[in-house]
Amino acid sequence: MDTTSNEASIRLQPLGGHGTFTVKTTSAAFLAIALYNAIELLILILANFHHHHGIYFWSMLLSTALGVIPFSIGAIIDLYNLGPLWLILVMIDLGWVFMVGGQSVVLYSRLHLVSRNDRVLRYLRYIIIIDTILLATPMSIIYFATAYSTPTVWARAFYIMEVIQVIWFSVQECVISTFWIVETAKLIRLRPGYDRHRNRIMYEILAMNLAVIAMDIALLVLQFSGYYYVQVPVKATVYSIKLKLEFAVLGKLVYLATHPVDSMGLEVSPVMAPVDVAPSTSPSSGASKLQQSMKDPFGFWKPTQKHNTASGGLM
């Protein structure tokens, strides 16, 4: 008996097709939370970014507006059978690409703030671009082909591709978050002990990245536990929470960039070090790097200039 094909065919049934009232209610609750988080985050992004350009801004915006929102709405339509199949497939597939692929771009877009390891950053950039194309394209084709046809081969291909993409993107996000944690820990060790407030902020950022890794592990557990009808809405909620954590990280990075300290450990007034000043030539200038990241829409995808100095940071 081909259990792989049977499981795949069950997964392609509507979310509400075989679900109990409890499953439907739980799924609807998770999807409602995801939509609330996404709409709130969308308002915060448009209200707080004064310059609507830069890879960080666009990755956050697209992951929310074209990722979490259509994915959640499509899943709700599927859950209660409120629309045609093609609409459900388009919304879920489009949302999945921007929600999952966009999360990796968001994580990558701030790595240059804590690391000057150009080789690692370049490799991560290539990996994100290549695996998004290699995984998203066949997954979309198989998704639609399986929905509109009955051959067993398509169901088996869907099951295999789903497992691969869940594992790959979860591992990829864990790798990026781990790299951020390692580089941030190095910066904390390089700073004098008097800067307790700024160190506390960096520890909070580390905790947020650990939370992202924990949520990726939770998704993997759901994937291999057979709770598919719960995994889909939980995935939307998890990614909406990840994006909100990213927005919180941004706020803390802005604080670190606009509240420098002098050699005595005293905070310098933001009036003395405005965030809109021209980028400094010092590679360790957090404010300059943060401003450059917000002003250059494609700067993160270009090779950065080599420096002989040690890794610069925000502290």
Image (cartoon, rainbow, N blue to C red):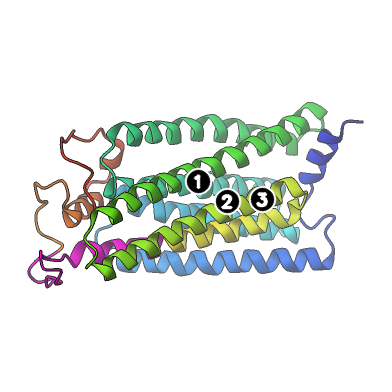
Residue at 28 percent of width and 52 percent of height: 187
CA gap, disc 1 to disc 2? 7 Å
**CB of mark 1 within 8 Å of CB of mark 2?**
yes
- Mark 1 = which residue? 174
Residue at 47 percent of width and 57 percent of height: 64
* Mark linked to residue 88: 3
* Mark linked to residue 274: none
Quadrant containing the N terminus is top right
Residue 29 drawn at (x, y percent): 67, 69
Residue 215 drawn at (x, y percent): 57, 56
- Three-letter amino acid code of the residue under disc 2: Asp
Give the label, 1 or 3, closer to the camera: 1
Residue at 52 percent of width and 60 percent of height: 240
- Three-letter amino acid code of the residue under disc 1: Cys
Instruction: Report the side of 278 relative to 111 (left or right).
Output: left
Q: Secondary structure at mark 2?
A: helix
Q: Is tag 1's residue or tag 2's residue first in the polypeptide sequence?
A: 1
- Mark 2 = which residue? 216
Residue 44 drawn at (x, y percent): 38, 68
Residue 155 drawn at (x, y percent): 77, 33
Q: Secondary structure at mark 1?
A: helix
**CB of mark 3 within 8 Å of CB of mark 2?**
no
The residue range painted magenta reads 246-274
CA gap, disc 1 to disc 3? 30 Å
